Amino acid sequence: MGRTLQNTMINLGLQNASCFLDSMATLGLAAYGYGIRYEYGIFNQKIKNGWQVEEADDWLRHGNPWEKARPEYMLPVHFYGRVEESKEGAKWVDTQVVLAMPYDTPIPGYMNNTVNTMRLWSARAPNDFNLMDFNVGDYIQAVLDRNLAENISRVLYPNDNFFEGKELRLKQEYFVVAATLQDIMRRFKNSKKGSSGPVSFDSFPEKVAIQLNDTHPAMAIPELMRVFVDIEKLDWDTAWAITKRTFAYTNHTVLPEALERWPIGLLETLLPRHLQIIYRINQGHLDEISALFPEDMDRIRRMSLIEEDGGKRVNMAHLCIVGSHAVNGVAEIHSNIIKTDVFRDFSELEPEKFQNKTNGITPRRWLLLCNPGLAELIAEAIGEEYVKDLSQLQKLNELVDDDTFIRDVSKVKQDNKEKFSQYLEKEYMVEINPSSMFDVHVKRIHEYKRQLLNCLHIVTMYNRIRKNPKAPFVPRTVIIGGKAAPGYHMAKMIIKLITAVGEVVNKDPVVGSKLKVIYLENYRVSLAEKVIPATDLSEQISTAGTEASGTGNMKFMLNGALTIGTMDGANVEMAEEAGEENMFIFGMRVEDVAEMDVQGYDAMTYYQKIPELKQAIDQINSGFFCPKQPELFKDVTNMLFNHDRFKVFADYEDYITCQEKVNELYQNPREWTKMVIKNIAASGKFSSDRTITDYATEVWGVEPTDLKIPPPNEPREALDETARALREK
Ligand SMILES: *Cc1c(COP(=O)(O)O)cnc(C)c1O
């Protein structure tokens, strides 16, 4: 027991968070997931004439039976206004208020009589909104203007790994933080009821752990300081010590364009008191650094929370590091990059703060639910306990030479492929060869994820078939899918290029059933659940050092796909678990990329040296795949030649060679399936149960609670007893 009252996760839209909620409930941790109840989630993607078109995701149109509004817990959130200083301290006044309405969704654990709560906030205008002063007399306009306040929870920003400094987004980030901290504070004070005198916050960090899932909720740090200092009247140093012990921060990316850096001007207008608090935090922080490194002005500049060059901005990652007692990356390689590169100065200052928590996925959704055939087969082989202890999959190693098991695993995959083929044939009106290798590359479209490298492989295969139509060819169905951020031009061009290549390849009678290219429209969790169990080959081909962890890679491994991948993110640990010889690893390592950055990357030399690369690029560049608009892909080829930050050409040759090795193994179904079994057996580490257990013991200091809902067959009194115990906690 002890620190079991409330552990809080804050989140603004990472898909991965729902795995964590499932694991926290399954492990019996008393934890809440907080976020925004967006009226419109991530857009629905339509592919029209090969281009991405966005449509609004009106997910609440038919109602949502899983949620319950809790108006009794509604809370005010303040914006704008000014700071009044007096003897009693700072006061934030003349603010505009928006109400935060909580909606609760139950999160049941797996077969453990435990239910946690996910609480999502929806913005509501106060009933006197705009009727107070200047708008007196214009009642109709005032009611119409309620939309302005309620826009805060209207729509999820669809960027992936890209920071866009929009005021509405900052409002969203503060909205979830301010409502959530009030909720936490209410629960903390409730737990203290009965004790006399003013509430003591000394035990706050023992009762509350807040995990900042990326920097999106970073404003929680100055907000908690504001609550402690301005409202609860704690002195600054006491408040700061409690705050640091409460927060921990998970970093999710090292791409510089993704790091949140909010302009000072925006903060000054929207959250003037918080800006003051950030300045004061920074002052203490920089004082500490100058005491340790006197006269190292460059270090002080690098480590400041405030960036000065090109307009003053607050570096939110720096704020999170300084305001937390633990900082982690999401795979070993990523955590090392954080320590030695992006946040090197900070890890030199406080090395014990920096940790790793390798990501994971829930086996309940990503095996039991999406792949019942495989789940049952495994249960027959090793029992059902593996569902709650995925490391038990290791027992499958005893069956790698078992002919029956090999046959059964291969049969499940074939069934899944045939079922998915029917779906594809219905949705895409193409003929699918279910015995071809299903080569799948699904994830957000981004230059760093290198869908272009895959595309070059497709063009290369196509040219090889055309050059030598009679030569043996291992048939493939290449499936690529994912959403591009609506404002990301190059990502949208990549989608158009893939669909254009697909048009030519799929129609060419010389190719026939040897090669098909499908662009999977509107990739989302429900579609992932269909395609992943049907996959033979998982594409995880980001430039080494760019993918923090990846979780798609883990889903495929668990579902019996083999991986072709770079030594990046969690791929490195997958290779460690399964053995490098059981994955198709290719390309530059992080060290090679760093070396190339020193020497300089020259795309042209690869183009001139590798004839098949030259041929593919010449075709794309000359309009071979879009004769009606031969100039269409000039932006893409120009990028690849002149400013490709992700060095596609440098890994091309090794990638093609590696794909040939994939073909070789695929021609030996028995050996292929044996490798599949070894991969499934090695995938236990990537359960989010393991990830959450590591957070619970190494960051939060929490243990499972003994509070369980009694089984339904027990007498009513048992339930009342649990309810009473919960109220008293
Ligand atoms: C798992 C998942 C992702 C993450 O995939 P990565 O390959 O790790 O980028 C993205 N979208 C959906 C729908 C997913 O299920």
Image: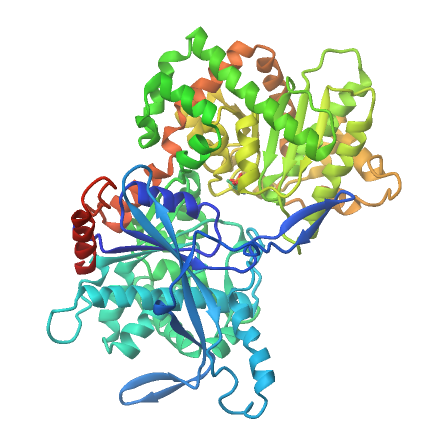
169 to the left or right of 506: left
Q: Residue 123, how many percent across, how many down?
A: 48, 69
User: Which corner quadrant of the image does residue 309 belong to?
Assistant: bottom right
Question: Which residue: 52% across, 84% down?
Answer: 130
The residue drawn where x is 22% and y is 63% is: 204
Judge whether residue 575 can be spotted in this image. Answer: yes
What percent of the width, then of the height, locates residue 458? 71, 28
Image vertical order of residue 138 relative to residue 477, above or below = below
Query: Is residue 160 left or right of 726 when viewed as pictured?
Result: right
Relative placement, left or right, of 352 versus 657 is left
Q: Position of residue 42 (x, y in %)?
A: 57, 52
In the image as oriented, which residue stretches furthest toward the left? 196
Taking the spot 85% from the left edge, 45% from the top edge, the residue there is 631
Quarter of the image containing the C terminus?
bottom left
Q: In the picture shown, does residue 207 fall above or below 101?
A: above
Q: How many marks?
A: 0
Instruction: Please state which of residues 728 and 690 is positioned toward the viewer in this rendering.
Output: 728
State the residue lying farthest toward the right.
628
Task: Please state if 619 lies on the left or on the right of 579 as rendered.
Answer: right
- In the rendered image, is residue 285 in sight? no
Tell me how the rendering is colored.
Answer: rainbow
Q: Quadrant of residue 417?
A: top right
Instruction: Note whether 698 is above or below 433 in the view shown.
Output: below
Q: Nearer the viewer, residue 694 or 586?
A: 694
Where is residue 701? Give x, y as percent. 23, 49
